[in-house]
Image (cartoon, rainbow, N blue to C red):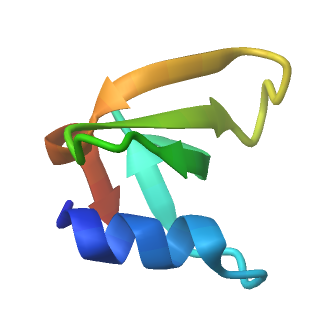
Amino acid sequence: MDVLRARDIADSPVMADVTYDGTPVYIQHVAEDGRTARIYSLEYPDEELTVPLEQLLEH
């Protein structure tokens, strides 16, 4: 995913259709370096992960 789009999604109050490894996720924050994002699964919101942006897909 493009860093600008990821930041737009993270800043938006509207839920975007984003997946990580096939699992729907919410983007909480995009790192300053633009390489990673902090996400959590919609199914398991207590389990936060930091993942590379290129592994996030918007549908």
- The residue depicted at 66 percent of the width and 81 percent of the height is 12
Q: Residue furthest right?
A: 46
Q: Is residue 43 at least partly visible in the picture?
A: yes
Q: Would you say residue 59 is visible in this rendering? A: no
| Relative horizontal placement of residue 58, taking residue 49 as reference (left or right) | left
Q: Quadrant of residue 39?
A: top right
Q: Is residue 46 found left or right of 47 in the rendered image?
A: right
43 relative position to 54: left or right: right
Question: Residue, x 24% and y 44% (percent of image)?
Answer: 53
Residue 24 at x, y percent in the picture:
56, 48
Which residue is depicted at the point 47% across and 79% down? 8
Q: Residue at x 78, y 33 (%)?
A: 43
Count of residue discs: 0
Determine whether 23 is above or below 19 in the image. above
Where's residue 17, x and y in %?
A: 53, 70
Indicate left or right for 51 with 12 as reference: left
The C terminus appears in which quarter of the rendering?
bottom left
- Image spot of residue 33 (x, y percent): 23, 40
- Residue nearest the viewer, comparing 20 with 30: 30
Q: For the N terminus, give its image quadrant.
A: bottom left
Point out residue 32 in the picture as x, y percentages from the top left corner: 35, 44
Which sits in the foreground, 31 or 21? 31
